Image (cartoon, grey):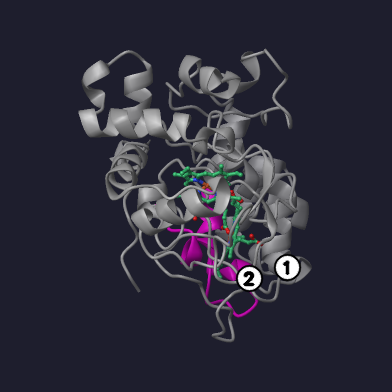
Amino acid sequence: MAVVAILARRPVIHASVEATRPAATPPKGAFNALTVRHIPPSAQEAREIALGELLFGDTRLSGDGKRSCVTCHDVTTNGASGRERDLTPQGQPLPVNTPTVFNAARNFRLNWSGNARTLESQARASLQNPSIMGADLTKVARVLAADAATAERFHDTYRRDPRPEDIVRALARYEATLITPGSRFDHYLMGEALALSAGEQRGYKLFQSVGCASCHQGVNVGGNLYQRSGVFHPAAKADSPVLRVPSLRNVATTAPYFHDGSAETLEDAVRAMGRAQLNRVLTADQVADIAAFLRSLNGVYRDRPVTQAAPR
Ligand code: HEC
Ligand code: HEC
C-alpha cells in the first residue's frame, strides 16, 4: 500500500518551524512533499511567532474581552479542550467538537469540513465568527494600538500600528510552529524497534491491514483527504457528512471524538470506525491493540508530552 510506504519512510523526526505548507495533494510517488525540514526561523519570523503567541492568549481579541484562542485550544495540554463541544459567548454548545491546533499546519485543509485552506483565513474566520471570538477586527486593532507596549511589539515586528492583517498573520505564524514530533511511533519508524510494545505493533499492523491507513495516512496520519463520515453505517450521532479525515496524531489526548463529540473513548471511536468506515466488526482484542497503537502517537511540544486537557 503506497500510503503506508509514505508513512513508514518519512517519519517526523525534528521539531521544526516550517514556513511553507505541504502541497495540497501529495504528488504520487514523490516523498519529498511529506518530509519535515528543520528551517530555523529568521529574526523577523521569530518576532512574528512571539507576537502571534501573545495574541493567541490575548482576550482583547474577543468581542466580549473574556476569551482568547487558548480558551478552547489549550496548548499546555492537548491544543484543544476536554469538552464534547465548547461554548459560544452566549453559553450555547458549538455545533462541532474543537479539534487540536497541534499539527494543524500540516493538514491540507482546516476545520472538520475542510472549508479553510490557510491558517490565515482560518484565524480571520475564527476571530470574526460570533460563536467563536465575536471580534470586530478593526476595533481590536484600535484597542491594541492604544496600548503602548503592544503597539511597540507591532512596530518592532511590522513597522506600523496594529492592523487586522498583521494580527492574522502573526497568529498564523505562531500556529505553524505548533508541531509535535517525538512520539513513540516516530521513534519506531526511525528504527527503534522497542519503542512500541508487542500489542502496539500488532495494532499498527492491523491499522494497515484492515484499512484504517487508506484514510488516515501521511505525515499527520490523516488530514490529507476528504471522506464521508459513515461510509457503511453512521459513525457519529449527528449525521454523516463528508469531512476532512482528521489527523490521529495526539488523538489519545483529545477525547471525546468525532465532529459532534459523540464517541466518549478512544476504544469507542476505533470500534465505530471499523463498522462505519470499513463495514467490519473488530474483536475486543483488535480494538485494544489498535487503541494501544494510537496511544503511541502522542508527541512532544516544547519538551513536554502532549496530555489530555483537564475536564472543565
Ligand atoms: C469557543 C471555542 C474556540 C475558540 C475561542 C477558538 N476556537 Fe479554533 N476551533 C474551534 C472549533 C469548534 C473548531 C472547529 C470548527 C469547524 O470545524 O468548523 C476550531 C478549529 C480551529 C482550527 C482548525 C484545526 C484543524 O486542524 O482543522 C484552528 C487552526 C483554530 N481553530 C485556531 C483558532 C484560533 C487562531 C483562535 C483564536 C483566534 C481560535 N481557534 C479560537 C473552537 C474554538
Ligand atoms: C473511509 C475513510 C476512513 C477509514 C477507512 C477510517 N477512518 Fe477514521 N475517520 C474518518 C473520518 C471521515 C473521521 C471523522 C468522523 C466524524 O467526525 O464524524 C474519522 C475519525 C476517526 C477518529 C476520531 C478522531 C477525532 O479526533 O475525533 C479515530 C480515532 C479514527 N477515525 C480511527 C480510525 C481507525 C482506527 C480506523 C480503522 C479501524 C479508521 N479510523 C478508518 C475516515 C476514515
**Is residue 225 within the magenta segment?**
no
Residue 133 is tagged as 2
- The foreground one among 20 and 168 is 20
Residue 120 is tagged as none
Mark 2 C-beta closer than 8 Å to ligand 1: yes
**Location of residue 74 with respect to 105 vertically, above or below:** below
* x 31%, y 65%: residue: 310
Relative placement, left or right, of 252 versus 231 is: left
Residue at image mark 1: 128
Residue 40 placed where, x, y %?
A: 52, 22
What is the crowding at mark 1: few (fewer than 14 residues within 10 Å), some, or many (at least 20)? some
Residue 10 placed where, x, y %?
A: 50, 17
Task: Please provide the residue range marked out in magenta.
Answer: 52-75
How many numbered badges does the structure rendering display?
A: 2
Identified by mark 2, the residue type is Met
Quadrant of the rendering where the N terminus is positioned: top right
